[in-house]
Image (tube, rainbow, N blue to C red):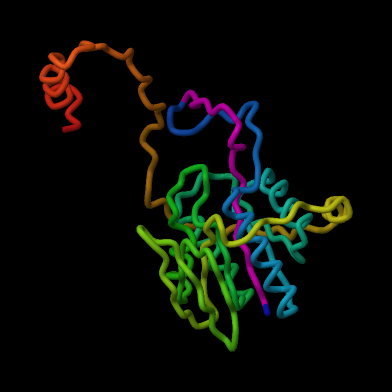
Amino acid sequence: MIVAVCVNHVPDTETKIKIGPDTTTIDKSGVNYMLSPYDEFAVEEGLRIREKFKGTVTAISVGGDLHKETLRKALAMGVDRAVLLKDDAVRDSYGVAKALAEELKVLSADVILFGKQSIDYDNAQVGTLVAELLGLPSASVVVKLDIQDGKAVCEREIEGGHEVVDVKLPAVFTAQKGLNEPRYPSLKGIMAAKSKPIEERAATPAEIRVETMRIRKPQGKGAGRIVGTEKSAVPELLRLLHEEAKII
């Protein structure tokens, strides 16, 4: 069983994000990075599939040298190979998906795993774009995955419930929280990951289809206002909610 896990290198959830001078990117000075949390579920699932069916797990990322840090985390968790599709330029979701799809064509993986979304831009597009570019079936926000006899039965989290679907392999899956409990890298795994090679090759060029015009922080909350403390204040409260706040 050949398993591929596509991972991203994102700002740590505890990092205080500042907008860069160009107002289209973040200020990267002092920013700590991490393996995107949803991708951890994908890595763990890939390792579990290998443990059940044997084979290999390859972690792939698109980006600059900083992405090696995330790939080493995947290696420390137990993946067999790590591939960096190198490109220091900013790519949109299509550009990332295009580079990954070209690499995955060569790998011919039976199972391709993503986190359901990356926590930096939260577009939740790359996994399904890759499936489309490869002409493969896909299932997103997967919380349970059972592979058997050349197909996968998976449970998807949808609004108001869960959906169970059958998918023929090869296929693409995006992992949701609840799919598994990611393992912590062992000391042995961390030490071994430092010496494991990371394969590097240039990412396939791709046109930019989405341009970021501006990044801004949300407006701060204004001070609260007390309309009154008696029931006589209710009509005025309703008027303000309707005319000013426009929420009713």
Instruction: Give the left or right position of residue 37, taking residue 186 as reference.
Output: left
Q: Is the magenta stretch mostly helix, strand or loop?
A: loop
Q: Against 142, is 212 above or below?
A: above
Check the image and name the residue furthest to the front: 231
Q: Against 59, is 219 above or below?
A: above
Residue 228 occupies quadrant: top left
State the quadrant of the N terminus: bottom right
Give me the residue at 46% from left, 71% from top. Answer: 138
Give me the residue at 87% from left, 54% from top. Answer: 195
On the image, the x and y values in percent for residue 33 come to 65, 39
On the image, the x and y values in percent for residue 213 come to 36, 36
Give me the residue at 52% from left, 70% from top. Answer: 172
Q: Against 31, is 187 above or below?
A: below
On the image, the x and y values in percent for residue 63 come to 60, 49
| Range drawn in magenta | 2-21
Instruction: Give the left or right position of residue 155, taking residue 209 as reference.
Output: right
The residue lying toward the viewer, choosing from 215 and 17, is 17
Can residue 8 be found in the magenta stretch?
yes
Q: Against 116, is 223 above or below?
A: above
Give the total number of marks visible in the rendering: 0
The residue lying toward the viewer, choosing from 104 and 118, is 118
